[in-house]
Image (cartoon, rainbow, N blue to C red):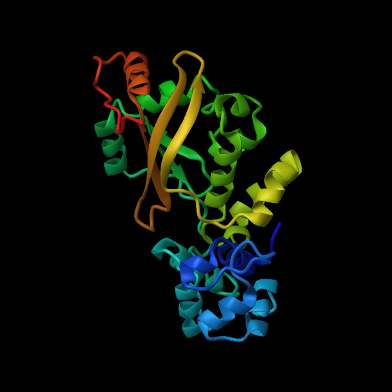
Amino acid sequence: MSENELGLFLRLRREAVTPAEVGLPTGPRRRTPGLRRAELATLAGVSVEYVTRLEQGRDRRPSAQVLSALADALRLTPAERVHLHRLTKGAESGFTCRGDAGPARAVRPTVRALLDRLEPTPAVLVNRLSEILAHTSGYERLAGPIGLLDGDPPNVTRFVFTDPRARTAYPDWARVADDQVAALKQGPFRADPHIAHLADELTVTTGDAFAERAATLPGLPRASGITRLCHPEAGELRLAYETLDLPTDDDQRLIVHLPADDATSAALDRLTGRRPGALRAVSSA
């Protein structure tokens, strides 16, 4: 499991940026999949030795000016820039934003009321450990038959990695697994003792399936996209999802699923017992 999250993130982003994207020529003999360290150093106005130290974890506290220059050179999105800032702060001992607070498990009444308003849409509320705290009945009709709600408490990441039913339920299991690990790593990761405990558990119980992802994936889960789900009653569904972060004090996120095509829309209507078209597809793809 990587102890150098900052260096890992910088290397992965460097390898993901092509020379053409930053106005550099593409030579015929490139072994590097993206930018070379020397190219990033030139673009950011720092030495190649310093880029090497950052990627190797020998320097984990770059200045704000250097961070800004690296972020510009790597064409980071706003979310990626926030993540980069978090990684540099996570390298500092002492103060943490969450202090000793455990994972939030209480659900505010207004959040429960919001879930009620979302019916029959499948929606679920999770905390930073991916524990399921509340959900709509529409989500229960999706998740219950595949076994996702069987845990005490139900935990999405633990289900994905430890329950054999998950690989049947998710045809794109590897992608789902990637996003679960990325979500755990979004923030302090192992500096958070509660997440560290779950990560240790999954490393022991699932081995490389979890450990290799923890060592190689940055903490940037996809906030939206499409998930395929094989439901024992409704067949294969294509679900578009949106992730909504609640205020920091809640430390929770709401994930809403919508049908991504007309066939899924009709299948969800049958599951919920609603009139056809109650859950309209968000696209015709």
Residue 54: x and y in percent read: 64, 76
Give the camera-side residue of 5 and 196: 5
The quadrant of the rendering that contains the N terminus is bottom right
Picture layout, residue 76 above or below residue 205: below
Q: Residue placed at 48% from the left, 63% from the top?
A: 98
The answer to whether residue 273 shows anywhere in this view is yes
Image quarter of residue 258: top left
- Left or right: residue 210 compared with residue 135: right
Quadrant of the frame with the C terminus: top left
Q: Residue at x 63, y 69 (%)?
A: 7
* Residue 16, image quadrant: bottom right
Residue 168 in the image: above or below residue 107? above
For image coordinates 31% across by 33% down, the residue present is 283
- For image coordinates 51% across by 28% down, the residue present is 149
Looking at the picture, tell me which residue is in the foreground, 145 or 36.
36
| Residue 200 in sight from this viewpoint | no
Closer to the camera in the image, 92 or 256:
256
Residue 19 in the image: state x and y as whole percent.
54, 68
- Residue 95 horizontal/vertical position (percent): 53, 73
Image-based side of 115 in relation to 159, left or right: left
The one of 276 and 199 positioned closer to us in this rendering = 276
Mark count: 0
43 left or right, relative to 117? right
185 shown above or below 66: above
Query: Where does the image place residue 155, in percent across and percent down from the top left?
Result: 55, 37
